[in-house]
Image (spheres, grey):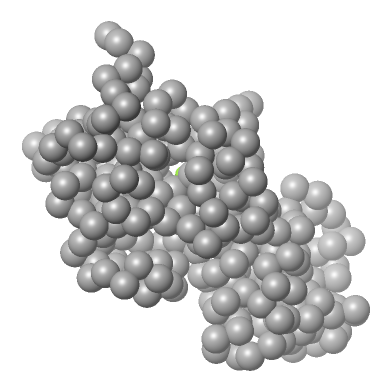
């Protein structure tokens, strides 16, 4: 078997592609699709370039630890040519959602700097004390402590509501799975407080913002992801076709278990970009 991506040639974008040729724009997940841990997956950089030649591409990621600028920088270092405007991270989605629906607000962040940066960029204020916040914005926090949970609790007891960037249970790294934002949201729930809004995939908010930016009907857009419960389920609910790649968290067996049905299945993003994908109903 040839290594993944070997079939890609420099002119792959101009080769007729029965799968990708149906779509005018692409929403692309990052972890498990373009990257794994700190590295680009084989053939992903070339595939990404080929996809951009076919239509508009937006990176749609639940990663809340980095701002859009930092995500663009990180992806750029790995060889993906992408600008911050082409990235929809869940920290940005959170800041945009609050600005659109509530105006500038005072937030208490239980998460990493990506959330704080996006909040400030959207005109929100970081509360000096938990009691001064009207919203607790929750994201993945790799330095969470009992003291941080106590501060968030003070904000919530004081009347603040919770906006969750996403509820991903886990996050893939080179060393295996680590707890995702779902662990943080779950800790708040354990203290008696449920999230008022969730903006990352599979929330309709993520797909509404993406389709709005693309200016295309859902039928012309393809979501490419590795998680059935976020990428594929969210696309399905939004009426967007999806391509499920097997290079990340979920496997073919997981499809059989849930009620989530991708449109296409491919071994990898590189394979998909080379037109090597099957309709999921034929595969099953
Ligand atoms: Mg992923």
Q: Is residue 138 left or right of residue 265?
A: right
In the rendered image of this protein, does residue 197 appear above or below residue 250?
Answer: below
Residue 70 visible (yes or no): yes
- At horizontal 40% and vertical 26% (from top left) the residue drawn is 43
**Which residue is more in the foreground, 245 or 20?**
20
- The image quarter in which residue 250 lies: top left
Note whether residue 157 is visible. no
Q: Is residue 216 left or right of residue 186?
A: left
Quarter of the image for the C terminus: give it.
top left
Q: Residue at x 79, y 53 (%)?
A: 144
Above or below residue 278? Residue 58 is below
Q: Position of residue 70 (x, y in %)?
A: 67, 51
| The image quarter in which residue 279 lies | top left
| Foreground residue among 124 and 85 | 85
Q: Which residue occupies 43% across, 24% down?
A: 42
Q: Quadrant of the N terminus?
A: top left
């Amino acid at each position: 078997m040839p290594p993944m991506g070997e079939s890609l040639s420099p002119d792959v974008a101009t080769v007729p592609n029965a799968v990708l040729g149906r779509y005018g724009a692409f929403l692309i997940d990052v972890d498990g699709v373009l990257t794994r841990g700190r590295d680009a997956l084989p053939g992903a950089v070339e595939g990404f370039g080929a996809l951009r030649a076919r239509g508009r591409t937006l990176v749609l990621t639940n990663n809340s630890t980095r701002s859009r600028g930092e995500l663009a920088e990180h992806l750029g270092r790995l060889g993906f040519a992408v600008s911050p405007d082409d990235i929809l991270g869940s920290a940005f989605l959170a800041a945009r959602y609050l600005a659109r629906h509530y105006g500038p607000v005072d937030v208490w962040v239980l998460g990493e700097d990506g959330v704080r940066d996006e909040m400030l960029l959207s005109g929100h204020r970081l509360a000096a004390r938990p009691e001064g916040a009207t919203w607790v914005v929750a994201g993945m926090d790799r330095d969470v402590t009992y003291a941080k949970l106590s501060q968030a609790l003070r904000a919530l007891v004081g009347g603040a509501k919770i906006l969750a960037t996403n509820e991903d249970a886990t996050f893939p790294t080179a060393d295996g799975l680590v707890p995702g934002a779902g662990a943080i949201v779950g800790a708040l729930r354990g203290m008696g407080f449920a999230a008022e809004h969730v903006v990352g995939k599979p929330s309709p908010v993520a797909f509404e913002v993406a389709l709005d930016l693309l200016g295309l009907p859902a039928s012309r857009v393809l979501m490419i992801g590795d998680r059935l419960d976020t990428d594929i389920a969210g696309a399905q609910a939004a009426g967007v076709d999806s391509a499920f790649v097997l290079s990340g968290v979920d496997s073919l067996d997981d499809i059989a278990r849930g009620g989530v049905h991708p449109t296409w299945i491919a071994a990898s993003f590189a394979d998909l970009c080379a037109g090597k994908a099957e309709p999921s109903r034929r595969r099953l």
